[in-house]
Amino acid sequence: MLSSKPKITFYLTLLIISTLFINDTVVMGAGGKTYYYDTNGRLVNEALHSNEIMEYQYDLNGNVKRKFRSNNMLVNPNFELNASRATDIASGWDKWSDTGSALFQVIPASVVSKSVAQKVSASGMRLGTAAWLFQDVAVKGNLPVLFNGDVSIENINKAKVSLCIQYFDAANTLLSQKTVDYPSGALNSYMTLSLTDITPPNTVRARAHVGIRTEEGGGSGAFYVDNMAFRYDTAGNILNNPSFENNLSGQKEIAESWSRWSDSGGSVLQVVSSPVTSGVRAQKLTTPTMKSGGASWLFQDVIVQPNVPISASGNIVVDQLTSAKVCIVIQFFDEKNKFLSQQAVDYPAGILKKYMTLALNTTTPSDAVRARVHVGIQAIAEGGNGAIYVDHMALNRDPQRNMLSNPSFDTISTANVGIADSWQTWSDTGNHTFQVLSPFQTTNTYGQKFSSVNMKKEKNGAVWLLQDVVVSGNKLVEFKGNILVESVVQIKVSLCIQFFDRNDALLSEKYVDYPAGVLQKFSTLSLTEKTPSNAVSARVHVGLQATAAGGSGTFYVKQMILK
């Protein structure tokens, strides 16, 4: 039983801003920038003064193939920098301990990334003490953050492995802290441990920790940690590497933090560059001929809380499918690794060659501590086989049962400039621009900005942001968005939902318009409709429609929901 005591007393009198651990792979530059190089002398991370991280990725010949701003605010999150040197912590990280014998090691064992992981161990721990690995991150107040990592416990006794975030103001005063513990009894297997929170109003810095702490005397333990992330995240997606971007070796067949299972033999996994909806990579799964009931799965184990509503979703393209089905499956386990239950949802048969969002909504069992999230192919007859692409998987706490992917527009990549990942655009008129707002650009909101000018009236000219979603027939659905209209001239802001059968034939559609004259404040626009009996997909739209030639307008959308 976890302690009900709300205290963590590990070093409240020693809270000072630390500098990053520096060796010859780190260079301090002008303008508040820090540069991190790998053992081959290649620039890997550039820590900007805004605390955004610029990442550089290389091809097999050592040429830069991608440069992008990462939404992960941690430097060296995979602990790979400084991997070949005899140091106890990876570059960019620091350590703190007030207990017994604490040992920190960067080791080439038990990894989920390229070659190394960070190990932390302690023994002879006194009551109320801890050993922490940590990194300081510049953040803003009143914003949602998510901190997670892949953790594997080697041994534990009278102690807990935990994540902890502490928040500080400009005077370096501790404002608050939050902690989450890895479940006891789960050993020698990597699972994703996540902590979600809202930064206090006056926050300028967060200290993100992973370590061992004890509330009993004589505690001890050892664990490995890999693939850490700290990011702003409105939706609270607790999966690690959800868009399959992390693949440090450049040649791995499975994206980091993910695993495979198959009872059919010969399944092929590939990290590919096309087609994608998030970042520049997606995961491809191809199965051979399978026996009836056989399956091939891509999965990730995640720590969850009991009795909470959760949504699992992913963007899926079915390339080819014969006598098989494509599914998302969630299995739940208790603290003793006993299987509790599972839920599944199937991708509609016959829809090929386009990304659609498949979502599963359920509630975690009362004694669940772990969820295994799967996406894969299962044979429904002898000889079943298929090939799929998967991108932007998500698992988040969701009382609203939202079926959309990236509904808060938090995730954006250079592959989809100006448009949030998982979303697409359509237009037959005018000149339009898109911009995704982030906490680096505004303190007030995330969201998608949408502008168009010189729109035509012919054929009701329009420009839309849209997403295709798997639905069931004869269900009442609500589609809504949180919208702010900045300006409109001979134009209207609208929502639209269209329904399609398995042959991609349009069955019905419905529109609703934002009220004229409501400007400069966020308001909810919604429509409710019953899906046709033979509907298998819905296309949800938010956008601009011309009411006369030469129309123009600008609006923002902060949150979209389809439930």
Image (cartoon, rainbow, N blue to C red):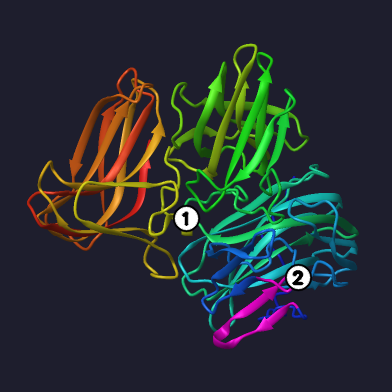
Which residue was labeled with disc 1? 415
User: Magenta segment: does it hold 399?
Assistant: no
168 relative to 151, above or below: below
Q: State the residue lying farthest toward the left.
A: 548
Query: Taking 274 as reference, is 152 left or right?
Result: right
Q: State the residue lying farthest toward the bottom.
A: 30
Query: Taking 233 as reference, is 519 left or right?
Result: left
493 relative to 139, above or below: above
Mark 1 is on which residue type? Answer: Ala
Location of the N terminus by quadrant is: top right
Looking at the image, how many numbered discs can be counted on the residues? 2
Which residue was labeled with disc 2? 40
The numbered mark, 2 or 1, whose residue comes first in the sequence reads: 2
- Tell me, for residue 519, which label it has, or none: none
Query: x, y percentage for residue 139?
Result: 53, 71
Distance (Cα) linking label 2 and label 1: 27 Å
Which of the 4 quarters of the picture holds residue 216? bottom right
Region in magenta: 25-43
Nearest the camera: 286 or 74?
286
